[in-house]
Image (cartoon, rainbow, N blue to C red):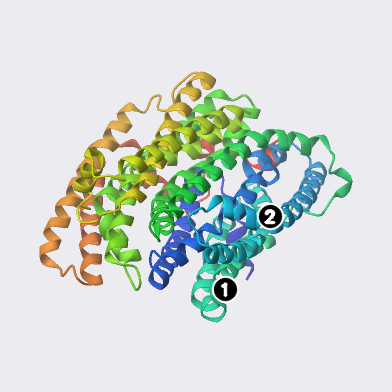
Amino acid sequence: MKRFTGIFNREISNIHHAAFWLAGFGVLADILGLFRDRLLAGVFGASRALDIYYAAFRVPDIIYTFMLLFTASTAIIPFLLDRSAEKRNEFLGALTAWFLFVIVLLDVIAFFAMPKIMLLSLPGFSEKDLTEAITLSRILLLSPLFLGVSNIFSSITQYLNRFIVYGLSGVFYNLGIILGVGVFYPVWGMTGLVLGVVFGAFLHMAVQMPFLGGVSLYLNWQKIWSRDILQLALLSLPRTLGLQISQIIFTILTGVASVLASGSIAIINLASNLQGIPITIIGLSYGVAAFPSLASFSIKKAKDSFTEHFQAAFRHILFWALPFSVFLLVLRAQIVRVILGSGAFTWSDTRLTAASLFILSISVVFQSLFYLLVRAFYADDESWRPLIINIISGFFCLVAAFWFLEALAHDGFVALSIKKVLDLSDINDIRVLAIPFGMFFGSLVNFILLSFSFRIIFGWFPAKGSLKNILEILAASFVGGAMAFFGLKIFAVIFNLHTFFGIFMQGFLAGIFGILADVGILWILKNRELAEIFASVRSTTKEPKEAARQVAAPEPEKLP
């Protein structure tokens, strides 16, 4: 038993090892997430019932992002790095007390204000739809409480470099939701569905509790007015406001989708979930793994180490994200049909979801790099610029979405061109695609502005010194995508595409063709990232040598 728990207590200081562990658990969590979405799509299809389910998350999600004012690990970790054990425990105790006080207050306010909020934010819902959405959203108010406490725990596990248990929390979160769909829903209906979400949030918190060894966590009401808490709130404020803006924008887009055909909200959420898999696996994993070191190097004014660490993470995110983006573009129809095409999920639902995924997949690279860029800003105590950039990009997102909404409402040049490119000529209403178009343009503007701001702050563009690597990865991704497309044509003749097995094998084997071609080109070009990954995989079971620690998360006990 000690050996088993020792695995989760293991400290991982090498960035590639940490990213691999996080990515591995991210893959497992996303596999469960795909199974969750398949269950939801099979039971409900792209229907008003699933619209109501997703709409019920809007208010709890806004509260959750607001509570990052006190629970964001990107802000908490720097406060843990340069403190004694006693001061660290006092800070965490006061922080937890503050969080519990504010979250309970916000939940109570939201509970009673929910009818008015829903009425304003979902103009396309009927009175019956609103009533059900209000009930579900009130239950989901428990989720920010559990997830907020879990975020504080996550800050501690990251501080301790215990990335394994941190990654495991997402797995348990999806297990809870799956229980809600498969077990609670048949008994309690839609109420059981959201109870599964709440249970998943509780598991997300509970799984980390046994692995906070060395850190005492207790409510410290005497220190809630300390200077540290004020500094944390001020540091987190810009990022929290930025995330709030993102949530508000998505709430507006959800409101827009509510006046479109039934199932539009579900289509957008399902496509976003599929697009989010590579972003979570790649961008979030490397961003989380890199941040403790970036923060430490920034505190020590070690600019060379900061640059080296950032560039390594940047190149490896590109290495994974570019091929993923291409494969999503090429294999989108097969992915949607295999994962979601069951039960009540119709062929029309499948095609509109695949079209939405096509648009969103183009921004996979931008959004993956976003996690690293923002963490680099925060490591250097630059938090207001990302907020301003988020406001600007959010504005572009809404403008683009409303422009496409109008353009797609009539069979003009834009609508006919999009229908032809995405093979949707026989579907009359494709206005739902206005929302992913808006999200794509918003993410593009966000990435461009972040890159130029990075140049202003650090004196060099994020891609500095990586042009050769980028060209190699682009070339390999293009060849891999072409081979995957060629494979689709070949296997369409071999397999029966009217069966699940046939569609799965067509997409799977075409994807294998593409991956082999991608890796082959990188191997021929002697790509640096490929060599580093092979070397890191070979050494994952070994303790990193001192040379590997030069770009790794520092040991906490070595800091002041």
Question: What amino acid type is highlighted by mark number 1?
Answer: Gly
**Nearer the observer, disc 1 or disc 2?**
2
x and y percentages locating residue 407 in the rendered image: 31, 40
Identity of the residue drawn at 63% across and 33% down: 238
Q: Which residue is mark 1?
A: 192
Question: What amino acid type is highlighted by mark number 2?
Answer: Ala
Identity of the residue drawn at 34% across and 68% down: 345
In primary-sequence order, the first of circles 1 and 2 is: 2
x and y percentages locating residue 25 in the rendered image: 49, 58
x and y percentages locating residue 54 in the rendered image: 50, 59
Left or right: where does residue 287 sit relative to residue 71?
left
Extreme residue toward the bottom, this view: 187
Identify which residue, 507 or 426, lies in the foreground. Answer: 426
Secondary structure beneath dot 2 equals: helix
Identity of the residue drawn at 25% across and 61% down: 508
Query: Is the N terminus in the top left, top right, bottom left or bottom right quadrant?
Result: bottom right
Identity of the residue drawn at 56% across and 23% down: 303
Q: What is the distance, in whole Å, between disc 1 and disc 2 at their CAs?
A: 23 Å
Q: Is residue 453 visible?
A: yes
- Splitting the image into 4 quarters, where does residue 319 fall? top left
Left or right: where does residue 505 sit relative to residue 113?
left
Query: Is the C terminus in the top left, top right, bottom left or bottom right quadrant?
Result: top right
Identify which residue, 233 or 89, lies in the foreground. Answer: 233
Left or right: where does residue 63 sit relative to residue 499?
right
Extreme residue toward the right, this view: 222
Q: Which residue is mark 2?
A: 113
Residue 45, compared with residue 468, is above or below; it is below
Q: Which mark is residue 358?
A: none
Q: Is residue 215 visible?
A: no
